Image (cartoon, rainbow, N blue to C red):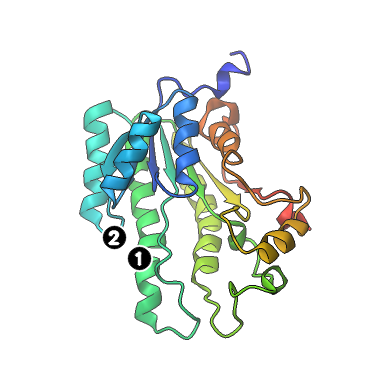
């Protein structure tokens, strides 16, 4: 196979969760540009449909708090397309970002969506992939799963507080990194690969002091933009990475390398 052909996703069917969010828009577009048939899935079907129309994908409702909804979404894709070749676990709930002082139930609600659902959806799609003895699963993590917070990035803003900082997102994304290794270990027998992308800070019109201070802590001198995750996703989803599994790849301008 010509090396450039190995990056093609033509003939592949992909499920992307959370396809209308900040990361999801470029991830879905990347999958479509590489030739995949793409399903994007989340709770907000109206918002999702608009994004699906933009990129030429199919929108499905998916409630990650529900076993039944997860099963229904996967079954619907198999009914329509006969297979799932690529799963991108991108959806995340940020509803439980309260202070460390919150009670156990508060954190459990976030873990149910961002951890338990990750396990269940990955397992269910993995069962579909096993039948063809191939597949690529890509988890969208975060540099926050690799490092603790740097308060200096937030000096001059109200974005961080020592009293109100929450551990939950760091805990969940750190867990995703090692879940990636676990899933790669148990699914590799069926030639199913599992990898994780750990994006760095994403420019979203944050206060100027944060943009300046965070950018100075990267090697490339900037936050991520609307094109920066597309290439790495296509690489990991495609045959170009046929011998890559169990990895956590920072895509952060060098932030975690310092």
Out of 116 and 90, give the one closest to the viewer. Answer: 90
| Residue located 71% across and 61% down the image | 214
Element on which disc 1 rests: helix
Q: Is residue 212 above or below residue 39?
A: below
Calculate the distance from the C-alpha at mark 2 to the C-alpha at mark 1: 7 Å
Question: CB atoms at circles 2 and 1 under 8 Å apart?
Answer: yes
- x and y percent of residue 165 in the render? 55, 78
What residue is at 76 percent from the left and 51 percent from the top?
A: 221
As drawn, 102 above or below 47: below
Disc 2 crowd rating (10 Å Cα; few below 14, some 14-19, many 20+) is some
Q: Earlier in the sequence, mark 2 or mark 1?
A: 2
Residues 100 and 117: in front is 100
Picture layout, residue 106 above or below residue 39: below
Task: Residue 102: name its quadrant.
Answer: bottom left
Disc marking residue 112:
1
Residue 161 seen from this side: yes
Q: Quadrant of the N terminus?
A: top right
Residue hosting label 2: 65
User: Is there any visible trace of residue 84 in the rendered image?
Assistant: no
Most foreground residue, 81 or 223: 223
Name the side, left or right, on which 228 lies relative to 222: left
Q: Secondary structure at mark 2?
A: loop
């Amino acid at each position: 196979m010509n090396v450039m052909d190995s990056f093609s996703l033509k003939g592949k069917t992909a499920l992307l969760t959370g396809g209308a969010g900040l990361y999801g828009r470029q991830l879905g577009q990347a999958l479509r540009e590489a030739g995949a048939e793409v399903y994007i899935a989340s709770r907000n079907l109206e918002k999702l449909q608009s994004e699906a129309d933009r990129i030429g994908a199919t929108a499905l409702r998916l409630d990650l708090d529900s076993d039944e909804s997860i099963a229904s979404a996967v079954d619907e894709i198999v009914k329509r397309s006969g297979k799932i070749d690529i799963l991108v676990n991108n959806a995340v709930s940020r509803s439980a970002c309260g202070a460390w002082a919150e009670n156990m139930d508060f954190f459990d609600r976030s873990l149910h969506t961002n951890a338990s659902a990750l396990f269940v959806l990955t397992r269910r799609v993995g069962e579909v992939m096993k039948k063809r003895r191939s597949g690529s699963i890509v988890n969208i993590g975060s540099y926050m799963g690799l490092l603790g917070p740097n308060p200096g990035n937030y000096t001059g803003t109200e974005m961080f507080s020592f009293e109100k900082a929450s551990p939950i997102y760091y805990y969940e994304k750190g867990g995703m990194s090692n879940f990636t290794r676990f899933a790669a270990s148990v699914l590799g027998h069926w030639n199913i690969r599992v990898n994780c992308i750990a994006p760095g800070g994403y420019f979203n019109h944050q206060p100027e002091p944060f943009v300046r201070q965070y950018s100075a802590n990267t090697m490339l001198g900037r936050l991520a933009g609307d094109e920066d995750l597309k290439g790495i996703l296509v690489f990991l989803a495609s045959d170009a990475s046929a011998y890559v599994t169990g990895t956590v790849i920072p895509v952060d301008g060098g932030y975690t390398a310092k």
